[in-house]
Image: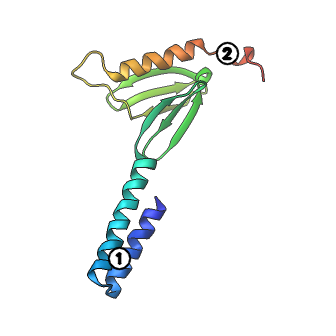
Amino acid sequence: MTAGFVFVVIALAGTAVGFDPASALSLWVLAVLMLLCAWRWYLVPYVALTPDRLVVQGAFGHRSVRYSSIRDVRPGAYGLRIKTNAQESFIGWAVQKSKWRRETTADEVVAEIMGRVQVSPPPSQRHA
């Protein structure tokens, strides 16, 4: 994300010092492309289920938690509310439940996560 802002500053400086229009336009196109790439790869939220953990990417944070550490997951209008055994909770806002439909993708994702939570062995039975 920082690289995108660096390109914006360079484009601003180039425009301010009087680059020719073609050069200034090229800098602005590059700056916008860098910002779009940064947005796509770092800010687009998602919820990923790996073989051993749940990964949640939000706009400003990244969380990864083992299935054995998850206590409860519920769908909601603002995303999946995930509660852990350590009394922490966080939101996976990539998947939201609609008020208008009974069964949504959020319900399917919660069912998949809870299925994996119930299958994962408790920490006392895992081998290091």
Q: At 49% across and 20% down in the image, what residue appears?
A: 113
- Res 78 → quadrant: top left
**Taking 102 as reference, is 80 above or below it?**
below
- Res 79 → quadrant: top left
Q: Secondary structure at mark 2?
A: loop
Q: At 46% across and 17% down in the image, what residue appears?
A: 112
Q: Answer yes or no: is residue 85 visible.
A: no
* Residue 114: image location, x then y, percent: 50, 16
The count of marks equals 2
Left or right, residue 87 beside residue 100: right
Left or right, residue 73 beside residue 30: right
Left or right, residue 124 beside residue 109: right
Q: Secondary structure at mark 1?
A: helix
Q: At 42% across and 45% down in the image, what residue appears?
A: 59
* Residue 45: image location, x then y, percent: 41, 40
* Residue 86: image location, x then y, percent: 61, 27
Eye-nearest disc, 2 or 1? 1
Residue type (three-letter) at the residue carrying disc 1: Leu
**Taking 119 as reference, is 3 above or below it?**
below
Residue type (three-letter) at the residue carrying disc 2: Pro
In three-dimensional space, the C-alpha distance between marks 2 and 1, rounded to whole angstroms, equals 56 Å
Relative to the observer, which residue lies in front, 83 or 94? 94
Tell which circle, 2 or 1, labels the residue nearer the N-terminal end. Answer: 1
Q: Which mark is residue 122?
A: 2
Q: Residues within 10 Å of mark 1 (few under 14, many from 20)?
A: some
For the C terminus, the quadrant is: top right
Q: Residues within 10 Å of mark 2 (few under 14, many from 20)?
A: few
Q: Which mark is residue 12?
A: 1
- Res 32 → quadrant: bottom left
